[in-house]
Image (tube, rainbow, N blue to C red):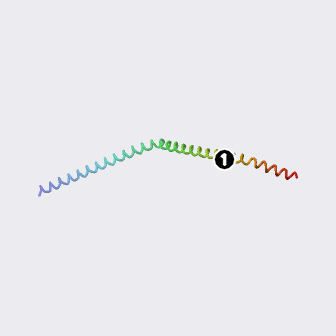
Amino acid sequence: MDDQLKRLLDAEKRAEQIARQAEEDQDRTIQTALREARTEEERFQARVPEIHSSFLEKAEARAEQTVKELKKRSDERHTQLREMAEAREAEALEAAFAVLTDAEA
C-alpha cells in the first residue's frame, strides 16, 4: 500500500510539475506575442507619416490633373464662344444699323 501511495504522490508531483511548466510556457508565449505586437504597432506608427504623405501626394496629383482638365475645358469653351461671337459679329452690326436707320426715319 505504501508503494502504491508513493507512486500516486510521485505521479501527482509530476502532474503538478507538468502543469507548472505548461503555465510558464504559456506565459512566455503570451509575453513574446505581446512584444511582437508592440514592435509591429511601433513599426506601423513610424510609417504613418510616410503613408499620410503618400496619400497626400496622390491627392495633390489628382487635384492638379482635375484643374488641368477644367482649365482645358474652359479654354475650349472660351475659344468656342469667341468663334461664335466673331461669326455673329456681322449680323449684329447689320441689325444695329437697321435699328439706327429705322429710328432716324
Considering the numbered disc 1 on the image, is that residue within a helix, a strand or a loop?
Answer: helix
Q: Nearer the viewer, residue 12 or 44?
A: 44
Residue 96 location (% of width, % of height): 80, 50
Task: Report the number of numbered marks.
Answer: 1
Kindly identify the residue that appears in the image at 21 percent across and 53 percent down.
15
* Front residue of 33 and 99: 99
Q: Give the left or right position of residue 53, taking residue 30 as reference.
A: right
Residue tagged by mark 1?
80
Task: Name the one closer to the observer, 28 or 91.
Answer: 91
Residue 61 falls left or right of residue 34: right
Residue occupying image coordinates x 69% and y 46%: 83
Q: Quadrant of residue 61?
A: top right
Instruction: Inspect the image, locate mark 1, and give the three-letter code of the amino acid beneath it.
Output: Gln
Q: Is residue 18 left or right of residue 69?
A: left
Q: Which residue shows up at 38% across the image and 46% down it?
A: 37
* Percent x, y of residue 81: 68, 47
Q: Quadrant of the N terminus?
A: bottom left
Q: Residues within 10 Å of mark 1 (few under 14, many from 20)?
A: few
Q: Position of residue 38 (x, y in %)?
A: 39, 45
User: Farthest right residue?
Assistant: 105
Work out whether residue 65 or residue 60 is closer to the camera in this orientation and state it: 65
Dividing the picture into quadrants, the one containing residue 68 is top right
Query: Residue visible at 43% across and 44% down?
Result: 44
Q: Position of residue 65 (x, y in %)?
A: 56, 44
